[in-house]
Image (cartoon, rainbow, N blue to C red):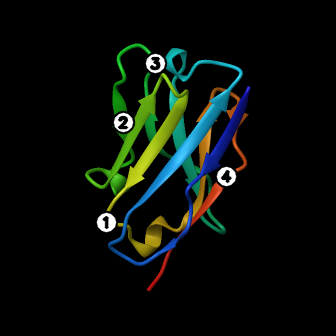
Amino acid sequence: VQLVESGGALVQPGGSLKLSCAASGFSVSSYVMSWYRQAPGKARELVARITDTDSRTIYVDAVKGRFTISRDNAKNMVYLQMDNLKPEDTAMYYCNTGPSWGQGTQVTVSP
């Protein structure tokens, strides 16, 4: 199982980014897939999750209405579309399924 994130960048407040998670060794359609984030000095927190059976999504309250998690089964990819970004969204973002984690991709929101 391997997860590789990409798409992080420095962006101004109000901007958008789309994070990608390339999965290998398993099918993303068969597992619950999640995005977590960890800011400096803070605990890692769940940002968004998409279920395997019915693609139901859940979000942490801080990102509801701004972030969208999605999955492309044909490409074996998971995405996190982030709109109206705020400085408090600054963190390392990680793709996750079960005990497996990617290396993370840095998102920095700053003027």
**Label 2 residue SS:** strand
> In the rendered structure, which disc, 1 or 4, sits on the residue that comes first in sequence?
1
Neighbour tally class for label 1: few under 14, some 14-19, many 20 plus, Cα within 10 Å: some
Kindly indicate whether the residue at mark 2 contacts the one at mark 1 (C-beta within 8 angstroms).
no
Residue at x-position 55% and y-position 27%:
76
Image coordinates of residue 104 in percent, x first then y, are: 67, 52
- In this rendering, the answer to whether 59 lies above or below 2 is below
Mark 1 or mark 3: name the one nearer the start of the chain: 3
- Residue 24 position, x and y percent, is 68, 27
Residue 84 - label = 1
Residue that label 2 marks: 58
Q: Is residue 9 left or right of residue 111?
A: right
> What is the quadrant of the C terminus in the image?
bottom left
Q: Which mark is residue 52?
A: 3
Q: Amino acid at mark 4?
A: Gly
Which residue does the image show at 39% across and 71% down from the upper left?
A: 86
Which residue ends up furthest to the bottom in the rendered image? 111
The nearer-to-camera label among 4 and 2 is: 4
Left or right, 16 with respect to 108, comes to left
Q: From mark 1 to mark 3, how far is it between C-alphas?
A: 27 Å
Residue that carries the numbered disc 4 in the rendered image = 104
Per the model, the C-alpha gap separating discs 4 and 2 is 20 Å
Q: How many marks?
A: 4
Q: Is residue 70 left or right of residue 41?
A: left
